Structure formats: C-alpha cells, structure tokens
C-alpha cells in the first residue's frame, strides 16, 4: 500500500509559506500538489506490437474472458484503463477530457476518444490497488490516433510491461527503440515473451536469453519473463510480476518532481519580489509636507494680518473721528440754535442722533474692511490640494458674506427672525460689535454718557458769548472749539470701539482657522501614523520574505536528498 502522506510535512510547509501571499496565486500550486497526492494513480502500462496478446493476458489475469476485445483492428483499438472499485462502472473520455458512461451499443473510435475506463470489483485488481492497469494500442499500428494516445501516456506511466510475441524471436528494433524512449520516464520495466505455449520451453528460454542479451548491450537492466495466457498460474504470475514494481518509488518520484517544481517556482517568485520591492511613501511624504506647510502658512498669514490690523487702528480711528467732525459741523447750526434757545434736550438729541449713524456706519465699514482684508490675506493657493483649497476658500467666503450680511441689516434686534435665525453662530459677533457702538436706542453707551456730562460745558461755552444776532459766530465757535472737545472726549472710546471690533472679527476667524488647523494637525498625525505603519509593515514583509525563501530552500533541499 502506497503511503500517500509521506510528504505531508513538506506540503504543510509550502502551504504555510503560501498563506503569507494571498495575492501570489501560490494556493493554486499547493492545491495542485494535494490533488496529485490524493488522486495520483500509478499507471502500469502494457505496451507492445499490435496483436502481441496484451488484452488476452489481462482478461485471464482478472478472470474475465473476452472482457477486453482481443485482436481488434488497428482502426478500433483504444487505450483502456482497469482499476479496482467496490462498484462496477465504465466511462469513456473524449479528446477534450469529457466523461460519459460507456454504452455497449456504441463504438468508441480513437479518433474521437482518448481512453476508456473500467472500474471493476475484482479480487485480482484489489490486490493491485496501487496501480491502474492500462491496455494500450500497438505502437506499430501506424495510426496517428494510436501514436497520440501513447504519447499522452508515456510521461504518466510509472511502470511498463512490454509484451513481445515469441514469433519476433526476441527484442526487435521497434521494440528496442520504444524501450529506450520509455526508459527516460521510468526504470520500472519488465519484458514479457508471450504466446510461449506455441513453442517448446527450450525455444522460449533461448528467446528470453536473446532478449536479455539485447537489454544488456544497451544497458537496460530489465527482467525478462516467458509467459502464456494458457499457463495454469498465469493470473498469479502476472500479479507477482506487477507487484514486484515499487509502487511507493513511483509515487515518490512523481510527487517529489511536482513538489520540487512548485517549490522552485515559489522560491523564484519570492526572490524576484525580494529584489524588486521598495518602500514607496512618496504620497504620504507629500501629504506630510503639505500639512506641515498648511499649518505653518495659515498661522503665519493670520498673525501677519493681526499685526497689520493692529498697526492700522490709529488711522481707522482718525477716519472715524474725522467723519464725526464732519457730521457735527453739518448740524452745527441746528445744535447752536437749540442751545441758544435754552433747549438742552433738543441739542443733546441732535448731537446723539448725528453721531449715532456715523459710528454705526463706521463700525459696519470697519468690520467689512477687516473681513475683506482677512479674506484677501487668506490665500490657500499652493498650500493644499485643489479640493481642500476649494473647501477652505468656501468656508472663509461664506463666513465673510454671512457677517457682512448681518452688519448690513441695520439696528440689531434680538427678536428678529429671517437671516439672523440662519446665522445663530454669528449673532454674538454682531451683538458685540454693535453693542460697543451703542447703536440700539435702549443702550446707554459710554460715549453717550460723555455727551451728557460735557453738555453743560458746551452750553457754558456758548452762553454769554453770543447774542441773538451772533448765531454765525456761535456756529463757528461751536465748530472750532466745541466739536474738537467732543471728538477729543470721544477719541479713546472710538479707539476702544475700533480695537474691539477688529479683535472680535479677527477672533472669530481665528476660531475658524484654529478648527481647520486642528483638522490639519489631525490629518498630519494620521499621515505620519500611516507612514510609520507602512514602514513597519514593509520591514516585516521583507523579514517574512527572507524567512520564507530560506524555508522554501530548506524544503527543496530535503526533497532532493
């Protein structure tokens, strides 16, 4: 009985290595070896001249007279396999390898069919369970289909019984050529001098000796037997001859060859892979550089803008003060008339309502200018990918437009709906900016208190200096002396307003950019982690490749011992 598990440890080692490379198609190689191990049948082929008596010998060996057709015509002879099975069955295999059940009424031509297979519950075949007995067409029939059928088997045959009709007088040239050919594939060969019942024992022995001499001349160390289907013990004799063939050797040779072939192929592929693989972190390195550049540049841009805005506050304040002066100058006549008439409340109202829209518009203008300045400064071109550039730009522009839209709504009403409801996140910015400017009528702003405090001084300045006919002089006095005092008192408050407004807008953008910078830092951290993991995986892969190549070479060395 053939030990089919003899090389299981080699197969398991090959499977273990193959499992490391699911994309390498090595599993197919392992499966081919397993398939061969589990289903390889050792072919024992009866070969010889046409009508040498091969089929007759097999019929008597299995005790089934006329089972195989004897003395078939060359045109109908087809290779036939006999093997043991608990249940009888018969199949025909066409030239494409398709299998069909044999029909007794059908003629199977070697032109259309490769071989026939008979599975027989025969005690004799059970004894030879390690072998598949193959009855082949004569190799001298001169028919192309026969030659092709034999060619299909020659490389698969693990043992050969060459049957020679005693009438040949020994091994003729055709038989010798065939013997030399099959010797390239197997050295398990025996020669049967058949039909010896038709001659004397002495003649049979002489023919056998001549055959042995021929084999010796050509260094073919094969046994020669004289035989006849009429021998009383022919079945046992054939079983004994076939059993002398080393089935395990045949199995080992075929399986070792297949295993070595697959192992060498795997080793070559792994070695080529080991030589060619390299660590490609180009994309990750590019991402890391980009994220670092983004983080540095965004922080740098914003810090530059904050510094510019701080440096420009004084100029902005002077602009606001100048606007207040101009507005009060235009209302000077009305204010003076109210004061000269002793109507303090009216004068106060005119001053307040004159300054109010100026500061309101100034705050709107300052906020819009700060917003536009930041938007202009925050240029993401070249810092990020096109997709992230569009994302960042859209965020900046949306925030800018939302804030500017709120500022353009005028007086702030905490109960207002519409656009304000959509922009809940930005309400506190508007409230803070406009609260500082005291635009709402319900809030007493610090600058309003200043007007109330200094109003008696303004009245005192004017009273007693101007008469009823001196309104023009009073107006000049108001413009030249009073308005400067008012703006002087307002200057620190306006400066504080502008500073706070600038800071509020900048801080809101800072929050937005901080969020983005945090995301950039997260992306940077993830990219660096991916690179580290990829580097670690690469080094592990290299180590695995090296170990597996060494393991494969060890297995190959073991198989070649």
Image: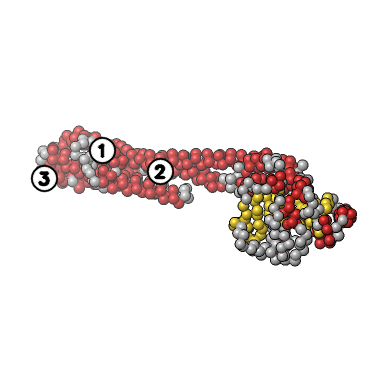
User: Closest to the observer: 47 or 14?
Assistant: 47
Q: Does 115 sit above or below residue 246?
A: below
Left or right of residue 218: residue 307: left
Which residue lies under the disc numbered 2? 305
| Label 2 or label 1, whichever comes before in sequence order | 2
| Label 3 or label 1, whichever comes before in sequence order | 1
Tags 3 and 2 touching, CB below 8 Å: no
Residue 242 in view of the camera: no
Give the Cα distance between marks 2 and 1. Answer: 24 Å
Density class for disc 1 (Cα within 10 Å; few <14, some 14-19, many ≥20) is some
Give the Cα distance between marks 3 and 2. Answer: 55 Å
**In the rendered image, which quarter contains the C terminus?**
top right
Disc marking residue 469: 3
Tags 3 and 1 touching, CB below 8 Å: no
- State the image coordinates of residue 346 (x, y, percent, origin top left): 13, 40
Question: Is disc 3 placed on a helix, strand or loop?
Answer: helix
Give the Cα distance between marks 3 and 1. Answer: 42 Å
User: Closest to the observer: 534 or 250?
Assistant: 250
Which residue lies under the disc numbered 1? 435
Q: Which quadrant of the view contains residue 65? A: bottom right
Q: Which residue appears at 65% of the width and 45% of the height?
A: 38
């Amino acid at each position: 009985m053939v030990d089919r598990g003899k090389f299981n440890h080699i197969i398991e080692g090959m499977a273990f290595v193959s499992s490391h490379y699911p994309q390498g198609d090595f599993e197919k190689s392992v499966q081919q070896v397993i398939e061969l191990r589990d289903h390889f049948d050792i072919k024992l082929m009866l070969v010889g001249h046409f009508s040498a008596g091969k089929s007759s010998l097999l019929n008597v060996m299995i005790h089934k007279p006329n089972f195989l057709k004897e003395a078939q015509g060359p045109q109908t002879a087809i290779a036939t396999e006999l093997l043991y099975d608990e249940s009888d069955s018969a199949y025909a295999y066409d030239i494409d390898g398709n299998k069909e059940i044999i029909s007794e009424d059908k003629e199977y031509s070697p032109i259309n069919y490769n071989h026939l297979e008979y599975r027989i519950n025969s005690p004799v075949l059970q004894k030879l369970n390690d072998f598949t007995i193959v009855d082949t067409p004569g190799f001298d029939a001169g028919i192309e289909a026969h030659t092709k059928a034999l060619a299909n088997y020659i490389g698969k045959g693990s043992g050969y019984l060459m049957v020679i009709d005693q009438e040949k007088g020994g091994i003729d040239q055709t038989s010798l050529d065939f013997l030399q050919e099959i010797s390239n594939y197997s050295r398990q060969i025996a020669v049967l001098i058949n039909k010896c019942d038709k001659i004397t024992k002495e003649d049979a022995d002489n023919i056998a000796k001549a055959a042995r001499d021929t084999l010796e001349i050509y260094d073919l160390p094969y046994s020669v037997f004289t035989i006849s289907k009429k021998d009383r013990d022919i079945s046992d004799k054939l079983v004994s001859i076939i059993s002398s063939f080393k089935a395990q050797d045949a199995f080992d040779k075929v399986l070792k060859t297949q295993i070595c072939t697959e192992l060498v192929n795997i080793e070559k592929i792994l070695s080529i892979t080991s030589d060619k693989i390299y660590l490609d972190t180009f994309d990750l390195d590019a991402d890391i550089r980009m994220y670092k550049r983004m983080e540095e540049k965004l922080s740098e841009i914003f810090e530059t803008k904050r510094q510019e805005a701080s440096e420009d506050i004084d100029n902005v304040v002077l602009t606001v003060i100048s606007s207040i002066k101009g507005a009060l100058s235009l209302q000077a006549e009305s204010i003076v008339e109210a004061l000269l008439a002793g109507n303090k409340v009216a004068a106060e109202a005119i001053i307040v309502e004159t300054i109010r829209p100026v500061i309101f518009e100034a705050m709107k203008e300052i906020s819009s200018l700060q917003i536009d300045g930041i938007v202009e400064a925050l240029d993401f071109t070249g810092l990020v990918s096109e997709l992230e550039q569009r994302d960042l730009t859209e965020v900046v522009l949306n925030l800018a437009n939302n804030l500017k839209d709120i500022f353009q709504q005028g007086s702030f009403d905490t109960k207002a709906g519409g656009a304000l409801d959509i922009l809940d996140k930005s309400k506190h910015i508007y409230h803070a900016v406009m609260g500082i400017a005291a635009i709402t009528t319900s809030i007493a702003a610090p600058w309003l208190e200043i007007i109330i405090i200094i109003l008696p001084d303004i009245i005192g300045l004017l009273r007693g200096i101007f008469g009823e006919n001196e309104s023009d002089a009073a107006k000049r006095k108001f413009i030249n002396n009073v308005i400067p005092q008012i703006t002087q008192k307002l200057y620190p408050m306006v400066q504080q307003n502008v500073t706070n407004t600038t800071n509020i807008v900048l801080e809101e953008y800072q929050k937005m950019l901080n969020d983005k910078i945090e995301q950039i830092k997260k992306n940077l951290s993830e990219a660096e982690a991916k690179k580290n993991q990829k580097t670690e995986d690469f080094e592990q892969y290299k180590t695995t490749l090296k170990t597996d190549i060494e393991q494969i070479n060890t297995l190959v060395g073991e198989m070649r011992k």
